[in-house]
Every structure is written in structure tokens, then in C-alpha cells.
Amino acid sequence: MSVIREDYLPGCGYKIYQDPTEFTFTTDSVFLAHFPHLANKARVLELGCGTGAVSFYLAARGAAEVTGLDVNPRMVELFNRSAEANGICVGMGYQRNKKFLSYRIV
């Protein structure tokens, strides 16, 4: 198993754990997270969320609920570790047969 890197998301100060041998967030994630308009009490679903950078930014911007989905178990593990370290509750995991019709942003 590789070394886990502890980084911080600029602008919101959340801690994020990353594995340099896997996907890590870049400035693209920062820009993408600031692009969507968040409706009041928005429920957000991020598909292919990786370590959760975009999910954490959207939570920091006021989304009422953020759910991240990824098929890579390593990303799920790191996402959950980061969420716990920051004391935030966001959903994460690999889900099958979930109805996505109630989300405002996907």
C-alpha cells in the first residue's frame, strides 16, 4: 500500500487524504466545484467523485446534502477518512439501483 498524503482544499480549509498513485484532485476540481449554482437546500450527487474534493467544496458552499459515488474502493476509503477528519457528514459509496431523480445537481 502506498503512502497517504494529507492535503488541504484551498478556500475552505478542509483536509483531504490522497493516494499519489491513484487519482488526486487538481485545480480543475476547484474550478468545477465553484461552477454550479446551488439552489436553496440543494441535494447534490457527484458521480465518479474520487477522493471527494468537489463534494467537500459543494458542502462548504452550503449544499444541504452531498452524495458521492465511486467504484474504486480506495477512493471510497479516502473520501470517508477525509469526511471524518473534517467532521462533516456526506454520503459516499458504491450504490446499485438507486433512484437519482430527486437530486438538483448531478
Image: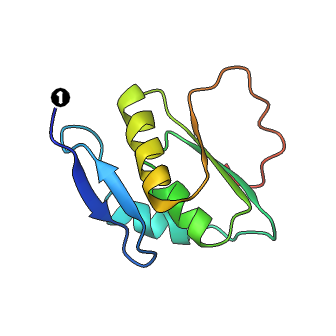
The answer to whether one can see residue 102 in this image is yes
Q: Residues within 10 Å of mark 1 (few under 14, many from 20)?
A: few
Residue at screen point 17% across, 28% down: 1
Q: Quadrant of residue 95?
A: top right
Is 12 located above or below residue 25 in the figure? below
Q: Is residue 14 left or right of residue 95?
A: left
Q: Is residue 64 left or right of residue 53?
A: right
Is 96 located above or below residue 25 in the figure? above
Q: Position of residue 85 (x, y in %)?
A: 43, 56
Is 31 located above or below residue 20 in the figure? below
Q: Position of residue 91 (x, y in %)?
A: 62, 43
Q: Quadrant of residue 59?
A: bottom right
Residue at screen point 61% across, 53% down: 89
Tally the numbered discs. Answer: 1
* Colour style of the rendered protein structure: rainbow
Residue at screen point 56% across, 27% down: 94
Q: Secondary structure at mark 1?
A: loop
The answer to whether one can see residue 50 in this image is no
Is 91 located above or below residue 96 in the figure? below
Q: Position of residue 29 (x, y in %)?
A: 41, 60
Question: Looking at the picture, which amino acid does disc 1 mark?
Answer: Met
Q: Disc 1 marks which residue?
A: 1
Q: Position of residue 69 (x, y in %)?
A: 56, 36
Residue at screen point 84% across, 44% down: 102
